[in-house]
Amino acid sequence: EREIEDDWHNFTALGTPEDHPARDMQDTFYIQNSLTTLLRTHTSPVQVRTMQEKQPPIRIIAPGRVYRNETISSRSHCQFHQIEGLYVAENVSFADLRQTLYYFAHEMFGATKIRLRPSYFPFTEPSAEMDVYLGLETERDVRLTKGTGWLEVLGCGMVDPVVLEHCGIDSERYTGFAFGIGIERISLFKYQIDDIRLFFENDTRFLKQFAGA
């Protein structure tokens, strides 16, 4: 697994060429003043390398550590862990994506309702954010969902044909979907943790609480 990546696999192959404004969404750290070697901002380069090496059908889960040049606070960090999923085959549709995410939400949160809101990612089209309905039964639900009952969980979408073509896959024959989720973000919600920095401070009193989780 590569945590140090090159610009092409991290950005350009995923529809974000040099000077594309979407790069501002994922500012990162570059190695030794290089403009082409960097700490990856997502695990999507794993998807790119897999599609370069294999022809569909492709089904993968890509977990790993990623980096972003962000101000460290109780809710964000310059490093975190991510899981991405990719499915590419003939006749893959948005309905397949929705049903896969519904199953995940039901198993993870016990949620019976999800919604997909239109969004933007340079490597998927159409793109969406998925919310799960937690309700407003407790004070925590109200606080987490800002009084709406809905909690944003992950980003997803249909793989942009440009990305397939960059990886040597015939976009006229194949379609696919992808999604990405931050592990720490979900853990904050699931275990009612107030500060993301606790995951990286190596305090055994904190870590031992989850040894059997």
Image (spheres, helix red, strand yellow):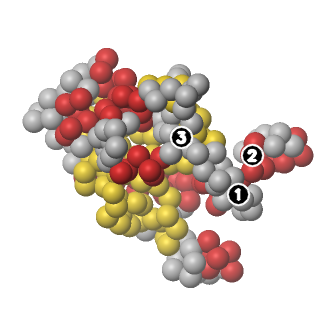
- Above or below for 87 versus 74: above
Helix, strand or loop at disc 2? helix
Amino acid marked by disc 3: Thr
Front residue of 31/135: it is 31
Query: Percent x, y for residue 128?
Result: 34, 58
Q: Residues within 10 Å of mark 3 (few under 14, many from 20)?
A: some
Query: Percent x, y for residue 210?
Result: 77, 45
Q: Outermost residue, right direction?
A: 205
Q: What residue lies at 36% left-to-right and 24% top-to-bottom?
A: 50
Left or right placement of residue 211 versus residue 100 in this view: right
Residue 207 seen in the current view: no
| Discs 3, 2 touching: Cβ within 8 Å | no
Residue 34 seen in the current view: yes
Q: What residue lies at 31% left-to-right and 38% top-to-bottom?
A: 17
Q: What residue lies at 44% left-to-right and 27% top-to-bottom?
A: 36
Helix, strand or loop at disc 1? loop
Left or right placement of residue 187 versus residue 98 in this view: right
Q: Name the residue under label 2.
A: 199
**3 or 1: tag closer to the N-terminus:** 3
- The quadrant in which residue 137 appears is bottom right
Left or right placement of residue 144 versus residue 211 in this view: left
Q: Outermost residue, left direction?
A: 172
Image mark count: 3
Q: Name the residue under label 3.
A: 28
Q: Name the residue under label 1.
A: 73
Amino acid marked by disc 1: Ser
Amino acid marked by disc 2: Phe
| Discs 3, 1 touching: Cβ within 8 Å | no
Q: Nearer the viewer, mark 3 or mark 1?
A: 3
Q: Quadrant of the C terminus?
A: top right
Q: What residue lies at 58% left-to-right and 25% top-to-bottom?
A: 32
